[in-house]
Amino acid sequence: MTDVNKLITDNIDVWTSAIKKRNAVGRGSSNKIELTGIKKLRELILELAVRGKLGTQNVNDEPASILLEKIAEEKTQLIAQKKFKKQIALPVITDEEKTTELPIGWEWARLQSIIQISSGNGLTSKQMNMEGKVPVYGGNGVTGYHDAHNVDKRTLVIGRVGFYCGSVHITPVRAWITDNAFVTTFSEENIYIDYLSWLLKATNLNENDSATAQPVISGRKLYPIVVCLPPLAEQHRIVAKVDKLMALCDQLEQQTEQSLTAHQTLVEVLLAALTDGADADDFQTSWQRIAEHFDILFTTEHSIEQLKQTILQLAVMGKLVPQNPSDEPASILLEKLSFEQKSWLESNLADNAECKTMLRKLNKLKSANAPFLLPKSWACVHLIQTTQLLVDCHNKTAPYTDSGIPIIRTTNIREREFRFDGLKYVNEETYDYWSRRCPPKSGDIMFTREAPMGEAAIIPEDVKWCLGQRTMLIRPMHEYVSNKFILLALTEPHLLERASEHAVGLTVKHLRVGDVENLNIPLPPLAEQNRIVAKLDELMALCEQLKARLSDAQTTQIHLADAVVENALSAPASS
């Protein structure tokens, strides 16, 4: 017998530390996690339960072989009364299908020998919206309410279609079961419904769905499944034990989530103090608090991501590196930049229609308002003021080819980098037309206005790209501004938040071209821009090292949880 209480308490760190982040992409994506260890613990409890390893068997219990005989006799009578449909006989269970040694009194059985399934009755959404108190059960549990019922006792329901096919639920006394679920019929005198529920949940019925785009399970898939059937008295003891252990898992899960939430809140508060500090003394005090407890603060992917976002924010606020009084102030830098920008645009008016548009827009600009307090040597400018050219894409979907010039779409830009999976290509003719306003070149920045909004990346050396739909091309005045600093300013955590106030669209929010051109960008002296970028690269590399170590540790914890589960399942059952 496996002492599950001891298994839980002795390995508490394993169950609570085995955590995995759910997949999510894009700026502002979800940071939700999966408590993998506790999930594995729940699965282990069920597996031990249906293998007879949760408790000691009672030799005085009526054996399951007698139960199966009673069930078969009851089924024969129902078939004779035409209350039960005769089923095609399935082959005898083979030794290969008997995956474990059963305790005394238990028996192997195919699901066909203990249950029958039939579809519920469909309801329209209008019917389900009626002011009723009867819960409606579909494939994923309660999906609405109705004013009538089609079952009048606790009924075991199996989801039969869609994402939740194979899910198992027990209805209250009165419920309506739709045709998205199976109604399960069985001998209630010989099988305890709560045990049957745990048994089917442990059996992973969804692994037996048909290979279609819309998952569907049927009797043909379910009936041949082999399960272990204990004596009736043992079924009741198992349910009591499982219910108690699942309640412990609930407590463990709640405590773990509360601990993670408290940790997350602490990290947020301490990092916010860095950006909210009134002066250098405040900043130093706040940083000292973080430095003293760094090892216990940044122990989750979310906390490391928060650290990265704070570093980005500090960089654009002028708090990442000290100011140098000998640096040429940004105000003078901006005067020189504006003069060179205007001179270049005017000298290229005859060859490039975009130059006239740029000059017109620049002449209409008002002063940019700093989004937060900036160092004295800094200035605040509109994005368009830092560029030689700033153009929108051709807003149509390009005709793709199997090969040719890669076209960068919004899906290919994430977290200040290009992603090369799922690339699309265009031919030279399409490239020439789509890039007629300004052919992209290395060092330019691509910025997404929509789907998702606010992603950006720098075009690398020796690469020819075509500008895709819903993107904009930003060509900085490289002699006066660092494209890496502009990229930082475009992807700092609060810029998108501020820009979103101007976003339009009922379903998918997007920025208009003018909104992007008028984005307020903090501008440091050029020398400080370069120092900020260098420091940022250094700190981001450290964050990636932290994430790599954390990932290794999490993988180890998950492997450890797997080992504990495997060891528990390999222990023999007690009789």
Image (tube, rainbow, N blue to C red):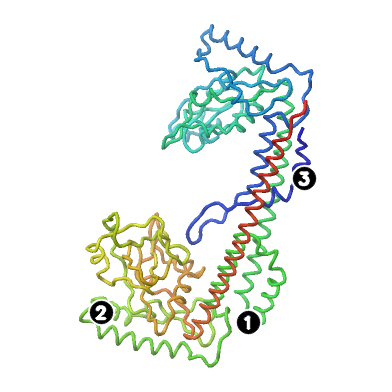
Mark seen at residue 9: 3
Q: Are marks 1 and 2 in contact (CB under 8 Å)?
A: no
Residue at the far top: name it. 80
Where disc 1 sits, the SS reads loop
Residue 515 picture quarter: bottom left
Decide: is 141 above or below 68: below
Q: Residue at x 74, y 29 (%)?
A: 573
- Of the residues under marks 2 and 3, which one precedes in the sequence? 3
Decide: is 170 above or below 390: above
- Of the residues under marks 3 and 1, which one precedes in the sequence? 3
Observer-side mark, 2 or 3, equals 3
Residue in the foreground of this view, choosing between 159 and 211? 211
Q: CA distance from mark 2 to mark 3?
A: 73 Å
Residue 55 pos. (x, y %): 76, 30
Circle 2: residue type = Lys
Mark seen at residue 279: 1
Circle 3: residue type = Thr
Residue 381 pos. (x, y %): 43, 80
Where disc 2 sits, the SS reads helix
- Of the residues under marks 1 and 2, which one precedes in the sequence? 1
Q: Are marks 2 and 3 in contact (CB under 8 Å)?
A: no
Q: Quadrant of the C terminus?
A: top right
Residue 461 pos. (x, y %): 38, 72
Q: CA distance from mark 3 to mark 1?
A: 48 Å
Residue 52 pos. (x, y %): 71, 28
Residue in the foreground of this view, choosing between 210 and 326? 210
Mark seen at residue 356: 2
Q: Residue at x 70, y 29 (%)?
A: 239
Circle 1: residue type = Asp
Q: CA distance from mark 1 to mark 2?
A: 44 Å
